[in-house]
């Protein structure tokens, strides 16, 4: 094969790749691993903008901007408020997502409880697998923040803070029905334990939000949740935000 033919072949392949580019800017959204030119005017919605501001105020995000990811949990929570049961978030850190949800759906006025489970000081070694360690997951990683979280939610009588290591603290959630479940603990063992513990308690139509499902560094969690869903004759809906949704039939 001549050099000219080789170069022609390379040029053709480059043109084909450019033809099928998924995003051709200008971007309407370019944050948190997601770039698109699709409509995202929800960012400018007054209610959501204030919910996001309150979430950001907790200090959880650092320099990151994650509007679409926050909007997903707000959307799921709005759907969940009409279902039977309480709300549960496993993996809270400083409480950013819960704070956004509380404002977005006026949770303080609802006859529901919102359980927030975390160590409030990062991961513990007993929950991390060898595969996850090889991907850079390690104990700690977050600063002690329990006092800050207590301050953030002190005015909400229906918010319950549960400090400790999941799965050991799951029984402290006394609800028989769960309408909303968010899981973000950065390793598979406690996440699957929480999903298994609450699955039978979830109301029909409830959604589990798995925060880490689509990230490359979280492949162990993805595989674990794929298996979890398969055993229950369902599938995880992957989102370009990196989240995954599991709908309870």
Image: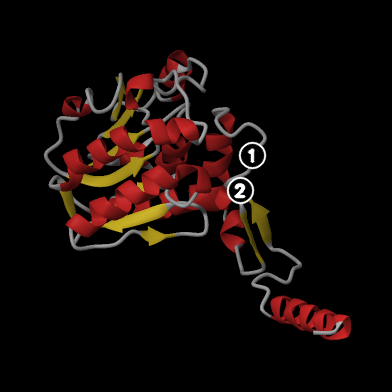
Alpha-carbon neighbours of circle 2 within 10 Å: few (<14), some, or many (≥20)? some
Using the rendered view, name the quadrant where residue 20 is placed: bottom right
Considering only vertical position in the picture, is 47 above or below 56? below
Q: Identify the residue at horizontal 61%, vertical 52% (top origin).
A: 33
How many labels were placed on the picture? Answer: 2
Q: Residue furthest front?
A: 1
Q: Mark 2 — residue?
A: 32
Residues 120 and 216: in front is 216
Tell me the SS state at disc 1: loop
* x then y, percent, for residue 227: 26, 53
Residues 181 and 149: in front is 181
Using the rendered view, name the quadrant where residue 153 is placed: top left
Residues 203 and 185: in front is 185
* x then y, percent, for residue 191: 31, 38
Give the spatial CA distance, label 2 vs label 1. Answer: 7 Å
Q: Identify the residue at horizontal 45%, vertical 39% (top origin).
A: 97
Q: Identify the residue at horizontal 42%, vertical 60% (top origin).
A: 238
For residue 64, the mark is 1
């Amino acid at each position: 094969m001549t050099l000219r033919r080789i170069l022609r072949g390379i040029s053709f392949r480059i043109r084909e790749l450019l033809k099928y580019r998924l995003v051709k800017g200008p971007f309407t959204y370019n944050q948190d691993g997601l770039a698109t030119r699709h409509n995202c005017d929800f960012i400018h919605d007054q209610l959501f903008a204030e919910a996001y501001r309150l979430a950001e105020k907790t200090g959880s995000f650092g320099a990151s901007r994650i509007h679409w990811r926050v909007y997903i949990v707000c959307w799921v929570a709005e759907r969940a408020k009409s279902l039977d049961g309480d709300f549960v978030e496993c993996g809270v850190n400083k409480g950013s997502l819960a704070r956004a949800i509380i404002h977005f759906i006026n949770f303080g006025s609802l006859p529901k409880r919102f359980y927030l489970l975390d160590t409030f000081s990062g991961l513990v070694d007993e929950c991390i697998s060898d595969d996850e360690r090889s991907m850079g997951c390690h104990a700690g990683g977050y600063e002690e923040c329990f006092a800050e979280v207590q301050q953030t939610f002190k005015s909400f009588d229906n918010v319950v803070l549960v400090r400790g290591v999941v799965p050991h603290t799951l029984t402290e959630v006394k609800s028989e029905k769960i309408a909303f479940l968010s899981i973000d603990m950065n390793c598979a063992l406690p996440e699957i334990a929480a999903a298994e513990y609450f699955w039978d308690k979830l109301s029909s139509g409830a959604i589990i939000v798995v925060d880490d499902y689509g990230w490359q560094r979280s492949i162990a969690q993805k595989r674990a949740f794929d298996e979890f869903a398969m055993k229950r004759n369902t599938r995880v809906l992957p989102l370009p935000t990196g989240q995954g949704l599991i709908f309870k039939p």
